[in-house]
Structure formats: C-alpha cells, structure tokens
Image (cartoon, rainbow, N blue to C red):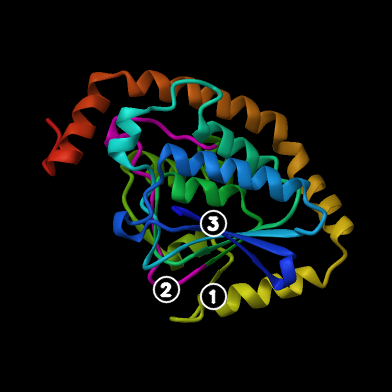
Amino acid sequence: MDIEVRDDHGGKARALVFNRPAKRNALTVAMYAALADELARAASSAAVRAVVITGTGDTFTAGNDINDFVADPPVSDDSHVVRFLKALVSFPKPVVAAVNGAAIGIGTTMLLHCDLVLASPTARFQLPFVKLGLCPEGGSSLLLPRMLGLQRASEVLLWGEPFDARAARDMGLVNEVVEEGGLLASTASRVERLLELPPDAIAAAKELIRAPLRAELAETMLREANAFQKRLASSEAAEAFAAFVEKRKPR
C-alpha cells in the first residue's frame, strides 16, 4: 500500500504513512484519493481522536510524482489533490506531522494545516512552485506571509530554495526539532499526552483557533487553484516539467 494506515495508541490515533520509499514517497493521484478518504473516515470515527502523518524511509514526501502529475493533472475543483487539502483543512481533530526527511512542495504546504509538527534534524523543506512554472497552493499564499512577513514569505515562495529543520522552527512552521533517531518516540509521547486531554475541549479549542481564517482561507485556496490550473497549461510549466524529467536546466 502506498498509503499505510495504522491504528496506534489503542486505536485512538490513526497514522497515515506515505509508503513509497523507492520514489521518495512522491504522491500520486491514487495516494491523494486514499488520504482524503482516510481523513473522512477518521473524522467520523468516535474511536479516533487524533491523526499522525509521516513517511517511511528517509523522506517525508518529495511532493507530487511528476510523471503521474503530468498524466493526470488537478484541473478541476473535485480533483483528489483538492479533496485531500479540503479534508485536511476542515479536519476537526488534532493532526500531528512527523517530518522524517525532505518535505517538498505540498509536503511543506500541508504542514500549515497541521496542529503540531515535529521534525528530525535531517528534515529539509522546499516550495519550488515557481521553478516548475507553477504558483503557490494549499493556502500558502495567505498563511506564509502572515507567519513570516511579506519579505521572508516572498523569498521562500519566489526563490523556492530549500531550508533546514532549524530554519523551519524559527519560521514557526515546525514546533520542535527532535534529536537524531528520536522522532518516532517523541511523536508517540506527544500524542500520548494529547490523548490524556478531554477530546471535546480539544475540538472546541481547535475550532476557535481555525474559525477566523476559514472563509479567507477557502477564498485563497480557490484563487490559488484557478491560478494553478492556468499555470499547468502554460508553456513555462511544460518546459519546466520536461527539464525535470530529462534532468536538465529549463530553457
């Protein structure tokens, strides 16, 4: 299974694991569909009180599988990529991300919608949308400027250069950089502490924290999706994808 689903902590926490290590856990349309479906199931389950998202091997996720992405691009509002993002944004229970390595593209933007993000010292983050002839997605054009200020957000989104776990922590994208080899244990400990808290109070607190941004975020994500679809059809994106596949610089 490219998405491994595991019930931990006596069934109270559901782990969704990117499980495609040979491809650096690059996400396919089928994986997005599975993630959206599993989040819907976890949201409606009385037993599940938290979700953990992580990856196998030494990569969180390399972002979209380029070949799969080109063959089946997200050109409609009901695409599986959009379904996944909407399910994550609206998820009513705590979401914990354990970033075990590189988090590229949507691998970074999805973290903006998690409630707790832990990272290993080897984690690397990158938003290379412009380099691929595309534009920001996942609400990043709204949330990153608010987190970082306009100049730092522009640097991250326009230049698209990678940054390390400590820089991500300083930005506020990551809560904690754990010691080498301690990510799984630290995540389990944090989730266990979370599960000791009253679940209805947690749900109420999350709703209050997220509610003021909801309408603005929905509008932003729609605007991003429209721009993203136009960029996908552009000659710049076509050349960037071809260069990526052919392992050369774009012309």
Residue 85 has which mark? none
Q: Which residue is mark 1?
A: 184
- Residue occupying image coordinates x 44% and y 52%: 2
The residue singled out by tag 3 in the image is: 173
Q: Which residues are magenta?
A: 119-138
Q: Is residue 124 magenta?
A: yes
Mark 3 or mark 2: which comes first in sequence?
2
Q: CA distance from mark 3 to mark 1?
A: 19 Å
| Residue beneath the point at 38% across and 70% down | 122
Look at label 3 and name its amino acid: Leu
Q: Assign the magenta stretch its main secondary structure.
A: loop
Point out which mark residue 121 bears: 2
Q: Mark 3: give few (<14), some (14-19) or many (20+) Cα within 10 Å.
A: many
Quarter the C terminus occupies: top left
Residue 188 is left or right of residue 57, and the answer is right
Q: Disc 3 and disc 2: Cα gap in Å?
A: 14 Å
Q: Residue furthest front?
A: 1
Identify the amino acid type marked 2.
Pro
Judged by depth in the image, the label closer to the viewer, 3 or 1, is 1
Q: Secondary structure at mark 3?
A: loop
Q: Earlier in the sequence, mark 2 or mark 1?
A: 2
The label nearer to you, 3 versus 2, is 2
Q: Secondary structure at mark 1?
A: helix
Q: Does the CB distance between marks 2 and 1 fall below 8 Å?
A: no
Left or right of 15, for residue 237: left
